[in-house]
Every structure is written in C-alpha cells, then in structure tokens.
Amino acid sequence: MFSMLTYTMELCGPILTSKETHFWDAVALQHRNFSLPDYFKFFPKPNCLDASPNHLSIPLVPYILGQSMPITVRPAVKLIAVLREPIARELSLYNHERANGYDWWVAPGICSASGSETFEQFANCQLASYRTLNVSIAQYDDAQRVLFREFLYGIWKGLYVPHLDAWRRSFSRRQLYVMSYDTLSTPEEMATNLAKFLGLYPLERKVWLPARNTQKRERREYTKQYTITCAIRDDLQAVFEPWNDRLYRTLRVDQQLALAPEHEPPFPEFGLHPCDDARLS
C-alpha cells in the first residue's frame, strides 16, 4: 500500500529508509532522546508517509507523538490503520522474521528455539505465554501491554481495540482511518477513499499494488510456510475471536455516531483463516 500511495498521490517516504522510520517505537521502547524536528529530518517535504507497523501497537507512541506536537499542529495529522485478520498477520510476521533470522518468540522458562521452528511451534509458544499471563479483555491495559510485550509479541499485536484506543486518547477519531487489509483487493476504490481522507488528488496513473513487500535486505534461506494445521488455527481463533467481536462493535458504533472519518467505509468482519491438516501427513 505504501508503494501505491507514494506513486498515485506523490506522497513522499522517509529519506534514509525504504518506508519505515521506526522513530517513535525507538523513542518509546529504548528511551531515546527525541524531538519533532529530529523526526522531520526523515522527510524531504510536506505530505510524507511513514509506514512503521510497530507505531500502531505500542501504546506510548501516540502519547509521545501527540505531546511532542504544538496543539495547533496536532489536528493536521492523518493516521491510517490497516488491520489484517489476526491469524494471517501472525503467519505473515512469522515468515518475515524467519527470513531475517530472528528468534524473538523465545520465552524464558516456556519456550526455546532451535532455529527451525514451524509456525505451529511458534504459535504454541505464544499461546503458552499468553495463558501463563492470563490476559483477558477485562485485564488488558497499557501497563500490562508494555510490561509483557516481549512475551506477547505475536499475540498482542492482533488484539486491535486496545491499540486503537491508545491512538484515540491522543488524536481525534476523525483523524484515524481504520481499514481492512482485505480492502487491498480493490485498490481503485481504496485509493479514492484514502485520497478524500488525506485531502489529496490522485494523479492520472493506474492504481496498482506490488506483488510483494518492496523492502530490500539480506535474508537467510528458509522455506516459507503457507498453510497451518486446523488445531493451531482453532486455538488461535479462540483467543482472537472475542477481541475481533469487540473491534466490530467499536467500529460500528463509530460509524453510527459519525465519529469515524467521513470517507471510511464500514469495516467487514474477518473471514475464518483456512487450515490444512494434510501437512501433518
């Protein structure tokens, strides 16, 4: 989507990185000194786009970002949250991190890593951590999310409502455009709605989406996993489903009360992630 927006609307991206600055998550998690001018150095001109995915789910990011801005500037910020079906997001993140040689899902005393884990092993580790911490909708708050982020790195990123709530505490809901990842299958309509939200005019160019992630880095050789077993799908679905239901209710209320941006379409419910037990044979 980053490539499509920068091409069809002439939005710019970060100078030093392909699309992600990771500036504010570094500030929030590594306690780096920061200033808004330091952030602006990443961008060559106004109307630029930062596609750092961690900015959505780290609760201190919207607070720090909002506090760093003059109150007269804050209303001009435009935020886009692209929410993917949580199990599909888990599998995509697993493949992404495996390609980069990371074993970040290891939880001391719960899981260990040999460097050849399947998605099922990874997900079971995440689920074991999640169950150990006994996180529920009623208990889930910002302090808990920060404290346990390393153990819930996979699971908690797909619990979307608390992440959106953190952004809504620092910015107006009218500034936050929430869209489904599935909308990427209709890029023309998506680009039209986003252009209206951003206050920009699409150029006379064909709207397209790249077939793969455009970031380039050295990756290790590994076999990408495309299918998952039904058992692990069902275990993950049991965790995510109540959070998904809460997301749908929240976004429906936003639409009914006219809190959402004018051109934000209704959010569709996620489909059930496919599974295939044939890979066990």
Image (cartoon, helix red, strand yellow):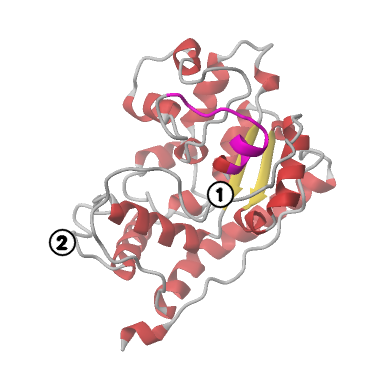
- Under mark 1, the amino acid is Tyr
Q: Nearer the viewer, mark 2 or mark 1?
A: 2
Query: Position of 63 compared to 267: left or right?
Result: left
**Residue 281: x, y in percent?**
31, 89
Name the residue at the bottom extreme.
281
Q: Where residue 92 sits: x, y (%)?
A: 43, 58
Q: Residue at x 20, y 52 (%)?
A: 108
Question: Element at badge 1?
Answer: helix
Report the residue marked by disc 1. 160
Q: CA distance from mark 2 to mark 1?
A: 30 Å
Q: Residue at x 37, y 49 (%)?
A: 153
Q: Is residue 202 above or below residue 74?
A: below
Image coordinates of residue 216 in percent, x first then y, are 36, 43
Q: Which mark is residue 114?
A: 2
| Residue 55 placement (x, y as % from top left) | 49, 35
Residue extent of the magenta highlight: 4-15
Q: How many marks?
A: 2
Q: Nearer the viewer, residue 16 or 82?
A: 16
Dot 2, crowdedness within 10 Å: few (<14), some or many (≥20)? few
CA neighbours of label 1 inside 10 A, class few (<14), some (14 to 19), many (20+) = many
Q: Are marks 2 and 1 in contact (CB under 8 Å)?
A: no
Q: Could you tell me which residue is drawn at 50 percent across and 14 percent down?
A: 36
Q: Residue at x 76, y 43 (%)?
A: 193
- Image quadrant occupied by the N terminus: top right
Q: Earlier in the sequence, mark 2 or mark 1?
A: 2
The residue nearer to you, when weighing 60 against 85, is 85
* Viewer-closest of 30 and 278: 278
The amino acid on which the numbered mark 2 sits, given as a three-letter code, is Ser
